[in-house]
Image (cartoon, helix red, strand yellow):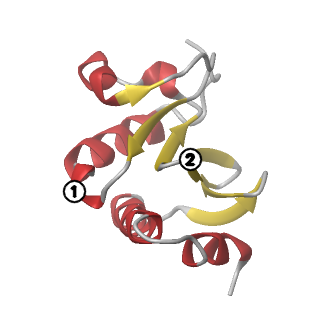
């Protein structure tokens, strides 16, 4: 098993289920992504460009986006920045909180801007 997969499978519930679901949605929405293990986290790349990462911290799972500056304002109500300058994330404490359509829409936007600078 790859380190990124081990990271996901070794998490306690409910985080493991949340991360497995997010993994499935990301791979379905962007089939050309490659799962890598960078900075101690599962990270999704298209070519050499990072798309997003998964992180379990405290009592939640984050899907972090480096190119957050390009995410449409209509999705900002779903995003958490917590004093981070570039990265914003979707945050989930339960699997029921995951809205696949929002995640897919954000992934598609990020993918369209992946070759641009991290800031607008």
Q: Residue at x 44, y 66 (%)?
A: 23
Image quarter where the C terminus lies is: top right
Q: How many marks?
A: 2
Residue extending farthest bottom = 1
In the rendered image, the vertical position of residue 117 relative to residue 111, given as above or below: above
Q: Determine the image quadrant of residue 27.
A: bottom left
Residue occupying image coordinates x 65% and y 22%: 117
Distance in Å between CA atoms under marks 2 and 1: 18 Å
Q: Is residue 66 above or below residue 57?
A: above
What crowding class fits label 1: few (fewer than 14 Cα within 10 Å), some (14-19), or many (20 or more)? few
- Residue, disc 2: 58
Between 4 and 9, the one nearer to me in the picture: 9
Query: Tag 2, which secondary structure?
Result: loop
Q: Secondary structure at mark 1?
A: helix
Q: Nearer the viewer, residue 28 or 96?
A: 96
Q: Position of residue 79 (x, y in %)?
A: 38, 28
Percent position of residue 36, x then y: 69, 64
Q: Nearer the viewer, residue 55 or 51?
A: 55
Q: Give the residue pinned by disc 1.
A: 96
């Amino acid at each position: 098993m790859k380190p990124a997969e081990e990271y996901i499978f070794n998490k306690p519930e409910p985080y493991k289920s949340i991360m497995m679901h997010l993994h499935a949605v990301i791979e379905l929405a962007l089939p050309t992504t490659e799962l890598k293990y960078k900075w101690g986290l599962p990270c999704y790349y298209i070519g050499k460009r990072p798309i997003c990462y998964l992180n379990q911290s405290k009592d939640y799972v984050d899907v972090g986006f480096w190119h957050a500056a390009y995410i449409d304002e209509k999705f900002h109500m779903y995003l958490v920045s917590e004093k981070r300058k570039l990265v914003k994330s979707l945050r989930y404490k339960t699997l029921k909180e995951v809205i696949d359509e929002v995640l897919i829409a954000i992934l598609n936007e990020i993918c369209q801007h992946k070759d641009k600078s991290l800031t607008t």
